[in-house]
Amino acid sequence: MATGRSFTLNSGYKIPALGLGTWQSPESEVYTAVLTALKTGYRHIDAALCYGNEKPVGQAIKDSGIPREDIFLTSKLWCTGHTRVAEDLEKSLTSLGVDYLDLYLMHWPVSLNPAGNHPLFPTKPDGSRDILPEEEWNYIKTWASMQELLSTGKVRSIGVSNLSTVHIDKLLAAPTTKVVPAVNQVELHPYNPQFKLLNYTKEKGIHLTAYSPLGSTDAPLQEEKIVKLIAEKTGKTPTQILISWAIWRGTSVIPKSVTPSRIEANFQDFVLSDEDGKLLDSISKTTQKRIVQPNWGVKVFLDDE
């Protein structure tokens, strides 16, 4: 990264401010994407069992020739693995071809039936998600299991993803919770800045990682007038503006791309001024939109709008 910035987690480990996301990166393209990123200088790779591409991600890490200890590698526990945390961790370690993860996240606070009709997205006969009954299993129990991983040497830090302040409050208040999550990875961009969650997690010592930081084709952030004005003024691209805004806020950020030129351009972040950062903050006053909203059948995003 141009500025080489990082953040120190409550576990004591450092997470590079800028990483490469691999969600929706096809197996046939993610190998080149990760290899390009590592050769460009990235040292933070974000993966997940659910993405179905951990094997080529791990192969690219191996083929890069970069020492494993120099790379911050994240993976995530999928919803069907909540009752078998250690087992699903082994699946990711095997696919990635590594002995440990720098960060292991609970992907969603939703426990899906591991014995359902699909390994990732089981459904009931009526087509709704096959979610385990709350009294049988819940994300609080999942977190208790994840805490046990820290003593195995196979995970350096543990965290969560897609948790609201309500979820985190409940988690921290649980008698079984002995470890405060190091990270909460959530959707963050100027259309969905989540100011309440940002301030709350800072108070709790939980670091936020921003996914989908560039929006999507349904959220044309890069065409926003404020983004384009700042880009023109600074001589940067709209993408670089959005990435640098995320880091300016104190969050790490994992833009996804499989295009080598974009991967390289995304790496050239810069230090955004407070004035420009606040201007970007103001975009949400006129446009608010959340892009990632899976139909779980239960409400996940609670009070953080």
Image: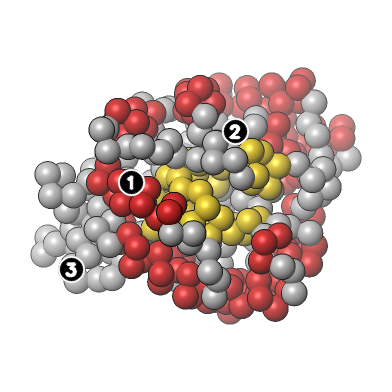
Q: Amino acid at mark 2?
A: Pro
Nearer to me, 282 or 22:
22
Nearer to me, 148 or 138:
148
Horizontal and vertical percent position of residue 279: 70, 23
Left or right for 86, reference 290: left
**Occupied quadrant, residue 42:** bottom right
Q: Which residue is mark 1?
A: 143
Horizontal and vertical percent position of residue 181: 44, 39
Answer whether labels 3 and 1 touch (C-beta < 8 Å): no
Left or right for 229, reference 223: right
Residue at (80% x, 62% y) in the render: 40
Q: Which residue is mark 3?
A: 115
Whether residue 242 is visible: no
Crowding near pointer 2: few (<14 within 10 Å), some, many (20+)? many
Nearer to me, 257 or 15:
15
Q: Which residue is mark 2?
A: 190
Horizontal and vertical percent position of residue 263: 73, 60
Left or right for 116, reference 303: left
Nearer to me, 258 or 155:
155
Left or right for 10, reference 257: left
From the viewer's perspective, is the residue at label 3 or at label 2 nearer? 3
From the viewer's perspective, is the residue at label 3 or at label 1 nearer? 1
Total numbered badges shown on the rendered structure:
3
Mark 2 vs 1, N-terminal side: 1
Crowding near pointer 3: few (<14 within 10 Å), some, many (20+)? few
Horizontal and vertical percent position of residue 102: 56, 55
Mark 3 vs 2, N-terminal side: 3
Q: Using the numbered discs, state the Cα–Cα distance from disc 2 to disc 1 in whole angstroms.
A: 30 Å
Residue at (70% x, 42% y) in the render: 6
Q: Amino acid at mark 1?
A: Trp
